[in-house]
Image: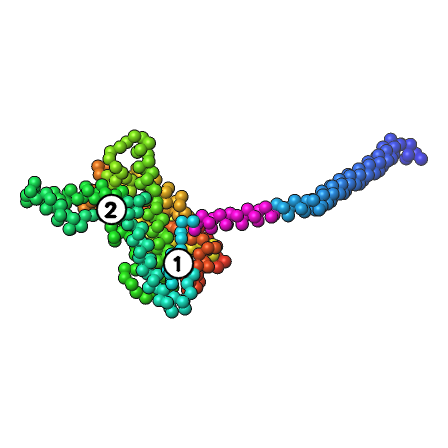
């Protein structure tokens, strides 16, 4: 007892500590449990609300709306594909052959029928006729002209003989150069075009297909030239600029120098354009033929004032799926042979690609050609 009386303060302090510590510990555990319960309640409420929203999204009306949206997207994609194919083939007609007095499409080819009737020779004759008609002087939108023939120069020299004597031949050459420039809108010589056939010969289905592609690309280039010249003529009329009838002297594209077409599908990438046959693309786009389209590289060069180059490129690209991959300006070849007028001109070489969509060309192509157009492949654009 004596010990308790002497240490009463410490005993009371120890008892208070035990009581307060126990109460604090009880409060701590109770508070932690309450926090845990509140957290679980919040999570339960969130799960309940999420469940309710999911139920709302999968109701019948929501399913109908989603199906309608999917159908709308599907129909839009289908229409886009249809419109793209229609645009691609709008200006690219299939060559027609007259068989038994009835015109019929040259493609797709029935090889037995071609063999039995000798239709490859009929095809080559019609191909040559159509190609020549593209650059006929009677083509009103293009109005091609060419250099004077030796006979034309000789006849003119006879007319000028009395006036110029010994100089009559030289004067006749100069006169005819100017006269020929006035006779049309663009110089196109016979060797300007890339011709698949220069004579009648036996040809397989793949070669005939290449001739068809040749016609398509050639027609697109010539139409772009004609449209560019007409655009400049119309502008001059609206501006009241008249310097005589439209001719090479005031046209935009003054001469088509050369056309080179690969004709076969591009199946591998490469460096610069190597020429008319077996060429590779410029590498600018990195495109090769895929399951969706075939890539046809080509090149052409023209004599044109530099200020009109953009017009020519635009008039080409608006016609179809053409991509310009390179434009190079060089000096005019043999400038003394032609007369282009007084405006400075350049020899402009244009490299390009034409895409032919597989949806419409695959059914036309001979099997030996369609097998070279990949199935299920994807485009490989340059990165």
Quadrant in the picture for residue 179: top left
Crowding around mark 1 (Cα neighbors within 10 Å: few <14, some 14 to 19, many 20+) is: few
Which of the pair 106/41 is nearer the observer? 106
Q: At numbered mark 1, what does the secondary structure look like: helix, strand or loop? A: strand
Q: Which mark is residue 125?
A: none
Q: Position of residue 277 (x, y in %)?
A: 32, 58
Whether residue 351 is visible here, answered yes or no, is no
Give the residues in magenta. 70-89
Q: Position of residue 22 (x, y in %)?
A: 84, 38
Magenta: main secondary structure: helix
**At x 63% / y 46%, what residue is drawn?**
68
Crowding around mark 2 (Cα neighbors within 10 Å: few <14, some 14 to 19, many 20+) is: many
**At x 19% / y 41%, what residue is drawn?**
178
Circles 2 and 1, Cβ within 8 Å, touching? The answer is no
In this view, the residue farthest toward the front is 101
Q: In this image, 287 relative to 344: left or right? A: right
Q: Position of residue 174 (x, y in %)?
A: 15, 43
**At x 38% / y 66%, what residue is drawn?**
114
Q: In this image, 236 relative to 20: left or right? A: left
Q: Which residue is mark 1?
A: 103
Of marks 2 and 1, the one in the foreground: 1
Q: Which mark is residue 145?
A: 2
**At x 38% / y 56%, what residue is drawn?**
95
Classify 367 as above or below 225.
below
Q: At numbered mark 2, what does the secondary structure look like: helix, strand or loop? A: strand
Q: Is residue 72 magenta?
A: yes
Q: Is residue 57 magenta?
A: no
Q: Quadrant of the N terminus?
A: top right
In this view, the residue farthest toward the right is 1
Of pointers 2 and 1, the one earlier in the residue sequence: 1
């Amino acid at each position: 007892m004596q010990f308790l009386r002497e240490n009463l303060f410490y005993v009371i302090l120890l008892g208070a500590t035990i009581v307060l510590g126990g109460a604090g510990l009880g409060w701590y555990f109770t508070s932690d449990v309450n926090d845990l319960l509140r957290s679980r309640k919040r999570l339960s409420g969130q799960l309940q609300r999420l469940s309710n929203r999911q139920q709302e999204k999968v109701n019948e009306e929501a399913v109908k709306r989603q199906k309608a949206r999917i159908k709308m997207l599907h129909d839009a994609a289908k229409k886009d594909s249809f419109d793209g194919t229609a645009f691609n083939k709008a200006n690219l007609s299939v060559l027609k052959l007259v068989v038994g007095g009835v015109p019929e499409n040259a493609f797709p080819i029935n090889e037995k029928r071609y063999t039995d009737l000798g239709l490859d020779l009929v095809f080559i004759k019609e191909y040559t006729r159509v190609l020549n008609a593209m650059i006929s002087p009677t083509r009103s939108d293009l109005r091609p002209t060419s250099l004077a023939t030796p006979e034309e120069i000789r006849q003119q020299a006879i007319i000028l003989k009395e006036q110029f004597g010994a100089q009559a031949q030289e004067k006749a050459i100069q006169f005819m150069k100017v006269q020929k420039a006035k006779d049309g809108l663009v110089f196109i010589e016979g060797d300007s075009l890339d011709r698949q056939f220069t004579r009648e010969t036996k040809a397989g289905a793949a070669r005939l297909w290449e001739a068809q592609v040749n016609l398509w690309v050639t027609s697109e280039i010539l139409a772009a030239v004609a449209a560019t010249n007409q655009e400049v003529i119309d502008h001059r009329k609206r501006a009241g600029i008249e310097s005589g009838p439209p001719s090479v002297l005031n046209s935009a594209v003054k001469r088509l120098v050369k056309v080179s077409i690969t004709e076969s599908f591009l199946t591998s990438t490469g460096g610069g354009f190597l020429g008319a046959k077996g060429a590779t693309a410029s590498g600018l786009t990195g495109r090769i033929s895929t399951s969706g389209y075939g890539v046809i590289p080509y090149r052409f060069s023209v004599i044109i004032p530099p200020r009109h180059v953009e017009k020519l490129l635009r008039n080409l690209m608006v016609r179809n799926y053409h991509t310009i991959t390179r434009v190079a300006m060089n000096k005019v070849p043999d400038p003394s042979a032609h007369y282009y007028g007084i405006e400075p001109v350049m020899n402009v070489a244009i490299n390009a690609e034409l895409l032919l969509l597989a949806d419409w060309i695959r059914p036309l192509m001979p099997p030996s050609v369609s097998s070279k157009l990949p199935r299920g492949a994807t485009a490989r654009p340059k990165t």
